[in-house]
Image (cartoon, coloured by chain):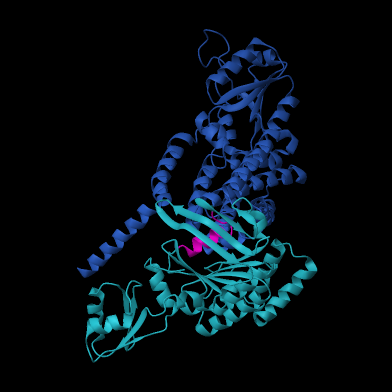
Amino acid sequence: MTDLAIQTTGLTRRFGDLLAVDSVDLAVPRGQIYGFLGPNGSGKTTTIRMLCGLLTPTAGSAAVLGHTLPQQAEPLRRQIGYMTQKFSLFEDLTVTENLRFLARIHGLPRLDRENRIQELLERYALEEMRNRLAGAMSGGQRQRLALASAILHRPTLLFLDEPTSAVDPENRRDFWEKLFDLSDAGTTILVSTHYMDEAERCHQLAILDLGRLCAQGTPDHLMSALEQRVVEITGPGLRAVKETLMQLPGIESAAQQGLSLRVLVGDKVRAPVNFLRQSLNDDALTVGAARANLEDVFVAATRGEASS
Amino acid sequence: MTSLRRVGAVTAKEFAHMSRDRMTFGMIIMIPLVQLLLFGYAINSVVRNIPIAVVDLSGSAAARVITEQVRVTQVVDIVANFDTPQEAEAAVVAGQIRAALVFPENLAERVAGGETVAQWLVDASDTMVSSALLSLRSMPLHLEAGAPLDAYRTTVPSFELALLFNPERRSEVNIVPGLTAIVLTMTMILFTSLALVRERERGNMELLITTPVLPMELMVGKLIPYVLVGLIQVAIILGLGRVIFNIPFAGDLASLMIITLAFIAASLTLGLLISTIAKTQLQAMQMTVFILLPSILLSGFMFPYDAMPVPAQYIAEAFPATHYIRLIRGVVLRGAHAGHMLPDIVWLLVFTAVMLTIATLRFRKSLD
């Protein structure tokens, strides 16, 4: 009836005095890779746990694949896969023992079980280590096993909580290819990350900070909203320039990146490049507009001035 | 000096750890407290108040006088009267009484002739209990009002004792069957309490609760392997006990199986409950020790149950080991059938049901 896999309104979770998730409104379309971008402690894991039915929301409502949470958590469990942030498979069982256990728990028919396990072992390059103990595998191998376990029962919605945090860049790229394969086959994927390059790969993105949803949209849309507000300055004495800039009104952030200083200007300032040239008034410095990237989006969003 | 400062830093850190871990802190206080109370108050190696029955075949006044004199020694507590020695022996087998005092029909003639006046049928499997009763053997009797205390003093002992089940009075006969209860308490509770906590510590629980597995399915599935483990342990103890210590096996295997399964179930579900309370494996271990100690000291394994004061007996009743020790001694040593000792079996089954229910209710499939 709806083309949304996840819809929440005012989703809130408190742990004692701590407001971990603060009235988050999400709309995740089916079939997309939807990213949660945010620093540690921004409420990504808590939100995912609530959407899986593992945590009861303090307030607000959530509908996941048409199931109202937390009342319908049990039927939902058959349709979702969850890859936890910490490796949660049994380290003292082998790869196939882990997969067989989960296949039986999920009630895969006997014949299908072995075929499915074989298929996943091949797809995720685990064939050769099928009898290896899960605890004895490398970060990348564990991650592939965890993904295979999460999709064993062919879930239509997959939650991945910082799936690449223990993995090298090569394996990360590989992993994302696999996610696109799954997405292509119709699986909705919600993935949390604090890597900008990963966030950029998502179809849609939600930026979380301190439990609040700061921005939501496609990466391109989010970046183009910052058009003209990012300025790059090169030249000598950049540390001093930064000090000067931070005194100016309307400057949201300035961060040095190698030989240049990347400045995010507030949206009240008109013609930011000229404004900075005049303010600094130093011929030794080159001041020019730069294309906004996701980090700029993130910085802008978490300062509470995001445009959606 | 710097070394001293570093030692100081480590010490301060260790105190900080201690104050964070309320369970360890509790154990620091509770272990000496409980041990002191157990050893100082509950545990008494001087046996008193042994439950016995009287069988008076003579129906004479002398029997009543002698019975009264035996009673005032406080060694025994007369809990029943039977008409025949056979009924008394059945009660001994069923574990209702530890001994029976049987007065023969010709009691009056015996008293007149200065002979031994009566016979004790004693369950000798517990040597401490039988020693206490043996001490009554030559007690001076005082049969006529006004006569001096040792008026009835003959060259023969006052009573004759028939030691049932363990005539050589070997202590291992009593210890070995009881040991099964201690070993099972230790391993069953520890294994299951660790099993669930370990999965929580390692993060496996987060995986399990996102699957369709139900709490009861998870619990029962986890317990089944340990049932087998427990049966193997009992087989080892009783098998080797027979080979090495020559412990008789008077009962039937079906009864042994019934009582052992009931006890294993009770211990496993108790372990399960611990695992829903403990947050770390260390805490689970500490709680197991907390149950193990009274199971060893109060259950009748080391010290006779009958010798403990009544409040301590009530506490002992709460522990499954107390019931199992009673049951397994009955089956192994006295040849009792499971049907003779239903109250203890029913108690273990009720305990199991209650523990499993509480554990399942406490174990929710959420991280709240």
Nearer to the camera, B198 or A161: A161
Classify residue B24 as left or right of residue B103: left
Q: Colour of chain B?
A: blue
The residue located at (21%, 69%) in the rendering is B2
Count every numbered label the image shows and give the total: 0
Q: Give the quadrant of the N terminus of chain B.
A: bottom left
Report the residue that reaches farthest toward the bottom: A284
Question: In front here: B344 or B365?
Answer: B365
| Residue A165 in sight here | no
Residue A87 at x, y = what percent? 55, 69
SS majority, magenta: helix
Residue most toward the top?
A: B146
Where does the image place residue A260, in percent across and percent down from the top left?
A: 32, 87
Q: Which residue extends farthest front?
A: A270
**Is B175 drawn above or below residue B99 in the view shown?**
below
- Residue B331 in view, yes or no: yes
Query: Residue at the right extreme?
Result: A111
Above or below for A185 versus A26? below
- Asked where in the image residue B33 lies, by quadrant, the reply is top left
Q: Is residue A50 magenta?
A: yes
Rendered view: B349 above or below B242: above
Q: Quadrant of residue B221?
A: bottom right
Q: Position of residue B199 (x, y in %)?
A: 56, 60
State left or right for residue A228 relative to residue B286.
Answer: left
Magenta stretch containing residue B34, yes or no? Answer: no
Image point (57%, 20%), residue name: B70
Residue B174 % position (x, y): 62, 42
Q: Which chain is cyan?
A: A
Q: Which residues are magenta?
A: A43-55
